[in-house]
Amino acid sequence: MKDTLAYPVYIQECEGCYCVSIPDLEQYTEGHTLNEAMMMAKDCISSLVIYYEDEGKEIPAPFSVDSSPEGNEKLYMIDADFRLKKMKP
C-alpha cells in the first residue's frame, strides 16, 4: 500500500456543523467547523484503510464509487498519510 492516498469527500454545512460523506469507504463523519470536518475525514480515512490492511481486506480505490455532489455539498480531496498510524507504541 502507498504511504498516502487522496479520497474524494463531500462536505456540506448542516445545522450547527459540517457533515462529511466519504462515498468510496461508505463512511460519514462531521465537525463543528470546516477545518474540523476535514480533519475528521482525514482521520476516518486513515483509520479505516489501516483497519482494512490489518484485516487483509481489499482497500477501495479513490473514485471507485460513481458519485457527485448533491444539494449544497462541495467536493474536497482529502489525503491521508498512513506512515505514522502504522507505528505501534
Image (tube, rainbow, N blue to C red):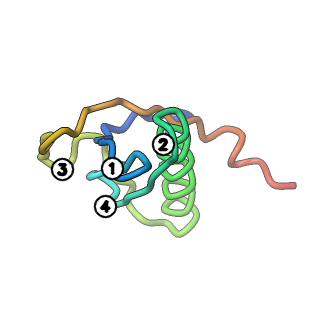
- 53 vs 26, left or right, is right
Check disc 4 and report the residue beneath it: 26
Q: Disc 4 residue type?
A: Glu
Q: How many angstroms separate mark 1 from mark 3 (CA)?
A: 23 Å
Mark closer to the chain start, 2 or 3: 2
Classify mark 2: helix, strand or loop.
helix
Alpha carbons under labels 2 and 3: distance apart = 21 Å
Cα–Cα gap, marks 4 and 1: 19 Å
> In the shown orientation, is residue 85 left or right of residue 16?
right
Q: Residue at x 36, y 50 (%)?
A: 19
Q: Which of the two residues, 61 or 10, is positioned nearer the viewer here? A: 10
Sequence-first tag of 4 and 3: 4
Q: Nearer the viewer, mark 2 or mark 3?
A: 2
Q: Which residue reaches farthest right?
A: 89
Residue labelled with disc 1: 14
Res. 1 mark: none
55 or 22: nearer the eye? 22
Residue at the disc numbered 2: 37
**The C terminus sits in image quarter:** bottom right
Give the residue drawn at x 50%, y 38%.
33
Image position of 30 with respect to 76: above or below = below
Residue 88: percent from left, percent from top: 81, 54
Position in image of residue 54 (x %, y %): 58, 63
Question: Where in the figure is residue 82, as x and y percent of width and height?
Answer: 60, 41
Q: Amino acid at mark 2?
A: Ala
Q: Residue at x 36, y 38 (%)?
A: 7
In the image, which disc is placed on residue 65?
A: 3
Q: Position of residue 81 (x, y in %)?
A: 58, 35
Q: Secondary structure at mark 1?
A: strand
* Callout 1 amino acid: Cys
